[in-house]
Amino acid sequence: MTTIRIPHSKVEELPAQFRHCIGTGRLGLALQEEYAKHLRLVQQDIGFSYIRGHGLFHEDLAIYREIETEDGVSSFYNFTYLDRVFDLFLEVGLKPFIEIGFMPKAIASGEQTIFYWKGNVTPPADYNKWEDLVYETVMHLLKRYGHDEVRTWPFEIWNEPNLINFWENADKEAYLKLYKHTVKAIHQADEQLLVGGPAICGGSDEWIDDFLAFCTKNQVRVDFVSRHAYTSKPPNKKTPDYYYQELAPPSDFFDQLQPVREQINKAGYADRPFHITEYNTSYSPICQIHDLPYNAAYLAPVLTNLHKVADSFSYWTFSDVFEEYDVPRSVFHGGFGLVALHSIKKPTYHLFRFVRNLGSDILYQDDYMIVTNKSNGDITILAWNPTGQKKDVRKLAYELEVRGQSYFLEKERVNEYAGNPFRVWRQLGRPRFPTKQQVEILKRHDMPSVETTTISTTDGTLSIALELLPNEITFLTLSEVHDETSTYIGLDDRLLPIASDNLS
Amino acid sequence: MTTIRIPHSKVEELPAQFRHCIGTGRLGLALQEEYAKHLRLVQQDIGFSYIRGHGLFHEDLAIYREIETEDGVSSFYNFTYLDRVFDLFLEVGLKPFIEIGFMPKAIASGEQTIFYWKGNVTPPADYNKWEDLVYETVMHLLKRYGHDEVRTWPFEIWNEPNLINFWENADKEAYLKLYKHTVKAIHQADEQLLVGGPAICGGSDEWIDDFLAFCTKNQVRVDFVSRHAYTSKPPNKKTPDYYYQELAPPSDFFDQLQPVREQINKAGYADRPFHITEYNTSYSPICQIHDLPYNAAYLAPVLTNLHKVADSFSYWTFSDVFEEYDVPRSVFHGGFGLVALHSIKKPTYHLFRFVRNLGSDILYQDDYMIVTNKSNGDITILAWNPTGQKKDVRKLAYELEVRGQSYFLEKERVNEYAGNPFRVWRQLGRPRFPTKQQVEILKRHDMPSVETTTISTTDGTLSIALELLPNEITFLTLSEVHDETSTYIGLDDRLLPIASDNLS
Amino acid sequence: MTTIRIPHSKVEELPAQFRHCIGTGRLGLALQEEYAKHLRLVQQDIGFSYIRGHGLFHEDLAIYREIETEDGVSSFYNFTYLDRVFDLFLEVGLKPFIEIGFMPKAIASGEQTIFYWKGNVTPPADYNKWEDLVYETVMHLLKRYGHDEVRTWPFEIWNEPNLINFWENADKEAYLKLYKHTVKAIHQADEQLLVGGPAICGGSDEWIDDFLAFCTKNQVRVDFVSRHAYTSKPPNKKTPDYYYQELAPPSDFFDQLQPVREQINKAGYADRPFHITEYNTSYSPICQIHDLPYNAAYLAPVLTNLHKVADSFSYWTFSDVFEEYDVPRSVFHGGFGLVALHSIKKPTYHLFRFVRNLGSDILYQDDYMIVTNKSNGDITILAWNPTGQKKDVRKLAYELEVRGQSYFLEKERVNEYAGNPFRVWRQLGRPRFPTKQQVEILKRHDMPSVETTTISTTDGTLSIALELLPNEITFLTLSEVHDETSTYIGLDDRLLPIASDNLS
Amino acid sequence: MTTIRIPHSKVEELPAQFRHCIGTGRLGLALQEEYAKHLRLVQQDIGFSYIRGHGLFHEDLAIYREIETEDGVSSFYNFTYLDRVFDLFLEVGLKPFIEIGFMPKAIASGEQTIFYWKGNVTPPADYNKWEDLVYETVMHLLKRYGHDEVRTWPFEIWNEPNLINFWENADKEAYLKLYKHTVKAIHQADEQLLVGGPAICGGSDEWIDDFLAFCTKNQVRVDFVSRHAYTSKPPNKKTPDYYYQELAPPSDFFDQLQPVREQINKAGYADRPFHITEYNTSYSPICQIHDLPYNAAYLAPVLTNLHKVADSFSYWTFSDVFEEYDVPRSVFHGGFGLVALHSIKKPTYHLFRFVRNLGSDILYQDDYMIVTNKSNGDITILAWNPTGQKKDVRKLAYELEVRGQSYFLEKERVNEYAGNPFRVWRQLGRPRFPTKQQVEILKRHDMPSVETTTISTTDGTLSIALELLPNEITFLTLSEVHDETSTYIGLDDRLLPIASDNLS
């Protein structure tokens, strides 16, 4: 272990892309009280800017209806629930990153559905009806929220059309047609609205080329390009409750995405943003990795670096209020959420909170840590140690050049033993439907351990040594101390029953 | 260290006297928002039944006024603030334990005052006016809150009249006269109201004999006898900010109070309750002991045993919103409170919370710990280790006889390093008026450290070993585990990136 | 108009049956935040004891699952959502009045469904699976909430099996079989649980006889008998948004129910309670009568009298968060709720609030009003004037014998012009999805108008004259005045710029 | 009565000066919970920008202390309470408008005090100590809140030094000396801080000339000039509870202030703002006019016009939590507050709320009303009718030119019968210390009456006729209606039991 010396000078900017957008379970779930609680929690501690989820046109939001009258069938658009959902988003400081989909039953050309909640993934049977639906919905938004506001909301067309599960036959031509018609309907409402696609998952990046070529050729607008990224391999074991998967290393995100950015540039869209509208470790909603400290430690370098290849990246998802596989069958069911049911914070929640508390001036960065300076003068440091191995303790030592004499240091740690409610739940016997008392216990154990000390400079530097346990993320805050001790005339700690020097 | 074997059978009852009553700064402070916040916090976590403080008739509550009219001077009684204070108490589940005092300026015979807030401690100049004041106040309470309710509120006459600071010349005859007149006025309003005294501090227990003899002889009613108890010696150093004091051992409380109970019995009042209407370690409002883990560890045997010699004991006080010496000059100023300014919990707060969470059935008790059984089947244990010495680690080992197979154990620890915001404040440079950021830091460090594990029985017993750091209090909760692991078909933790066995 | 003289003596008791139970949309809706807001509102102002709704076993609560494993298919019971729903109920002071139904798809023998949300109404294909489902669900409740608690929760078997919409073919034999098997499963969990049926709607009361005869003959327990009651006639016009219906007079409730009570008695069940587990004016969820002052005025005599023929009656329903016809297509869509979307109180909400504030001692009662005495000495009066006619003003005059000299009178009125947000919504142009500003306006107009005065007795009586506008309900509170005016020495209102005598 | 025709074009701007600043009882009262509740209420509905009150250096905030140490007496500055008070202000969106005063006892040259709470009004005995106190206090503010923030906080030196009650002998020379030294100390901390005076009350405006001449001559900075204004005459009757006073007409404010603005201009300070740092009708804290609708009606033209002669005007005060005369002896005691004790809104509260809801574009204005256009398109109108006479009904008729076809009109009225809790309190027998039930009644009657209707244009105008009862203020909001009625296919209101045409 070498000691690294870190000068007090900015080497690079740390932007806020990691909290540009967050994923959510289908929009209809936003009607739930539990969902709203989790969202308020996340917004208070992390503060995302946008939110994106499936199901805008799904049956439970109930937007599209066909009504029989004396004069025949007429379309009716019901925005009772949509208003409630978007009002909630705006109330908590989130703008919708709108995903256009899936297909209302009454318009769908087929019966193929996806998920427990049966989203229809077939093209429109009648493109006029589809365009009307899109147009009327957008017009309603413009009236309710104003043109200025809605022009800041991106409209992404469909979700992962390159997968046969999400789009009938993964039919590319059909997708391009859908894209064209949908954009037309959106721009009929307001030409300045932002549109993009193709929202593909990894594995068929030729779609990017074909999509952009199509748009160029047909003069269809593309305001942004979107793709998803997960680093899990196919399950090596499936059970009724969980899927087991292995992960590629974190660098896989960069390996997947860097070439796509280049494809976009080459296609003549270098000035358009590239949004990763979904990412996570595993793509399975029942993979326990999501619940573990490992997930946080693994993602730490991703959150602090992915802005180098993408303009935003949206963690999938903020909450375990989610139903793709089924209604959750246990409190820790391997869901995507930063927050587990009952408002229990998972380790990755704290990763986001820590990155939120980094400064915008990077002083130093390597594969295992990042050191930043905040506008209030504090220095904040995030370090990580993802590993599945029991013995992999990581030691870090560095000397920080600073300007003050004495610093208060606060260290927050999440690892197997701290900030890990999954472990406590195991100790409790993995109760599927925990009692109120058990929920209270789990919530008492969803926060990092904290340690504090005061350290002084030697020759203008602070010496700091860290030891990260396996799967740990550590967050350090260093604040200059303005010592007022001398103002307490006659102070004498030796006369107190203090059983420590109390400062170390 | 011997291992103690603890059978699963009740050896004694643990009553709730420790939370029968709590002390407060003068009643006028109850108008403050900060005060109300602390009170709500304390009531939520501990839940006292009564509250007692000075200053009912002090100028800031403004009850007594003399008004000049055309027909001369008339008395006016203003209950605007009193109603607000008592409404707050009842709203948070507290009944007033009323202390009658001090003397309104307009009725006082002299000018002697006590405290920064200048409570007048002289006898009435006019006993008719005094009786009217007491009568009118009690009548107002009876009208507003009802006879049934007010009959449960004890009325204690004055505070520490045996001290020249609290009662002019510590004049015993004058006190007995005051007692007689006050009781008369109270009973004129309602004969069933409870009255008592003499509310003395330690050092002159002959007052008890004289007080009871006087009441017997003059047929003045005494529904309860009250006294105070502190175990601190005179200050060995005084500074503008702090007094430094040493404490007698905790057993001093029992040595002080046992004889008084016997005096009461001998005087023919064996059937009357004996209330300790104030107690604490130091009697000084600027003694840092109150802020330390030592204070909690020292008081642990007191809270769990003092009911053996008294019918209630009222900790002085719940909050550092308090002004006897001066307005607090620093966040940690050595105040009496369980809660420091800015709603920061001190170690003794957790002692009360822990005792609150003990069961009512004692299974075992010795000088360093108590083991109880709760009605929900949990076993809870409190252990303590008061010492001023750095090396005094205390080890405890015992075998608990239990009925279940497997137990979830949660351990909460307060010591020099955990649940000790005083230490963090020192590390921050003892800021007198902390910034918002510093307050947040202090609040992040006002909770115990928590650890969990699952343990299994051997031959029907659980083996538990504790190591208490200096000045530690430890609280253990043992809950039987109903293991649902087998319901997760195909579960295989070996496939997860968990870097520990995760259950130890 | 004759003046009625009302002596100050109790003529009868007014029991609290009208708030024994309240209806709710299907249980799955209780996950919604909007639902929870309405429920908290209702409980704060009215305070029901029980809550009853459909859909316990519907797909959205997701209780029943069949899982394929290596060893074949096994049943899985998921209580994630059920716990959340029942926890909410108990948190707001409500006990479940459990309706057992409808049929999980996986157990159902057919595909017939009811409602927008597609509740399956066919008998079990496999009675063993059904019994297991009922047993496991009840066992879970017993474990989570305790036997003592759950023994106070009635279990009603199915809903309106005498209607072909609610029970395949309205097959009586099939229902009796279901009843028998279900009761068996419930009692297997705990024999003391309360069971009942047949939960029929009006029109085929021979079911009552047959049901009781069957139970007597087969020794199947019946702890209570239940039936529904509505007074609306078949729609005379149906539109996509609303059904239009006429109502029989309020007395129709009594005409429907009195004979049933007699049937029960004759069948040997005179000691069993008779619960009206649903009632309202119209049975349609899109009948605007529910939104009108007329609905409140019409139901006033029902709420104050129906306890004479039934042991409880459960208004269908507390909230417009409801989806039987469809997701609400407009804020005022004729839903059953006391509370409209956006927490807007309808006139009938105030009727319930008024009856809640009646005293338990009836001093007088006739066809248009009720006069009661409260335990705090207040006299409260409710009067009503249901009519569709513009000219039907009702005048009432009476002399109340009272004990005090002077009374403060507060009059709250709901009629076409006050407490009628429906009217304001019409004035706003019937916005289907109101803006935030419109919602605020609607909420400003959902409270009664209030007037106050002070009146004095003449010969020990108070003279009161009322004029009720069409469709008005009026609530009067009379509180004795204890005049303190004389304590303001020198008071002289003539010196103030008051432009009225200010007391009339 | 002539009908006024009002074109739809802006004639003038209505600025927000009326809510630039609000007065408060002494700063120490800001520690109270009741105070904070009122402040939050006021900020939510009205939203002031600054707050100004006495007592910064009064004993209860406890800033200045002299401490005896071995080395002699030293000064100590305690900001525990000041921080709490200013933190509250900033939390609710208010900046301090700082009034420097009164004199700490330890620095004062004399013993003269003012008010029940005994503010010392004598010059410093030692100007060095005074300068130190001011400097240290300002430095603390700069450190805690930042230079950028504090530079927006005006510092006004003392209060009404031209009155012998507020400044010993009303000694002008002594005041000028104080001003000079205080400004010096403030600017020693930060030269950019804003300073001003002389904060005089009416009656000796020569002070303005002398003050400005002194500052010009001695090069002492003046960033703003301040004065107070009340329109009440000396009391014609005083009682222990109330003072009775007559008011000059509202125009008296302009008559008092216009000349002062000219004096300032002439003295060469035309570019400095002129702040009315206190105004109200009566200057007495026990004058019932403050509680009456008359007070609101009288002040309506003042709030909508006073910006023409002053840069801000600060209503004295927001709340009846106030103690200058004594602790309030009754709920309605004639206090200055917009909000009475127990959070009861007085009529003048609604005046402020109404003016808050006027638009910034004035379409029309005369002696009895103002018509404005809001940015959202609504037209809002305020009209008033101050009079002490029972018969003075005021009728107004006008034709508004508008652009839409149909408008929703909402009318809010405060007069003797509506929004007048004082009247209800009289009816209740003027209870000094109201019971909880009485408080609830009073709060139910502290809102305006509301009426709604829909009106249509004729020839592009809306005809509106108003009838204002004595002492009424009326607020009208006109919002264009977008009628959706035609989307309800088949709608037929004639089939509903509605007993009115329901739109008038």
Image (cartoon, coloured by chain):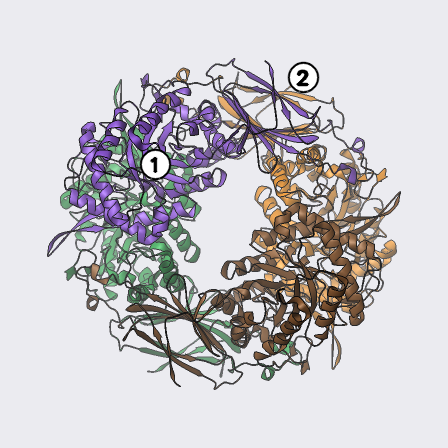
Chain colours: A green, B brown, C purple, D orange
Residue B345, percent from left and from top: 53, 66
Q: Callout 2: 10 Å neighbours few (<14), some, many (20+)?
A: few
> Is residue A411 shown left or right of residue D99?
left
Looking at the image, residue D13 lies above or below residue B179: above
Q: Nearer the viewer, mark 1 or mark 2?
A: 1
Point out the image quarter for the N terminus of chain A: bottom left
Looking at the image, residue B55 lies above or below residue D353: below
- Helix, strand or loop at disc 2? loop
Q: In which quarter of the image is residue B428?
A: bottom right
> Is residue A140 shown left or right of residue B57?
left
Q: Residue D273 carries which label?
A: none
**Closest to the observer: C109 or A272?**
C109
**Residue C63 seen from this side:** no
> Is residue D436 shown left or right of residue D100?
left
Q: In which quarter of the image is residue A66?
A: top left
Q: Are marks 1 and 2 in contact (CB under 8 Å)?
A: no
Residue D470, percent from left and from top: 71, 26
For badge 1, the amino acid type reads Gly
Q: Which mark is residue C25?
A: 1
Residue under numbered circle 2: D2
For badge 2, the amino acid type reads Thr
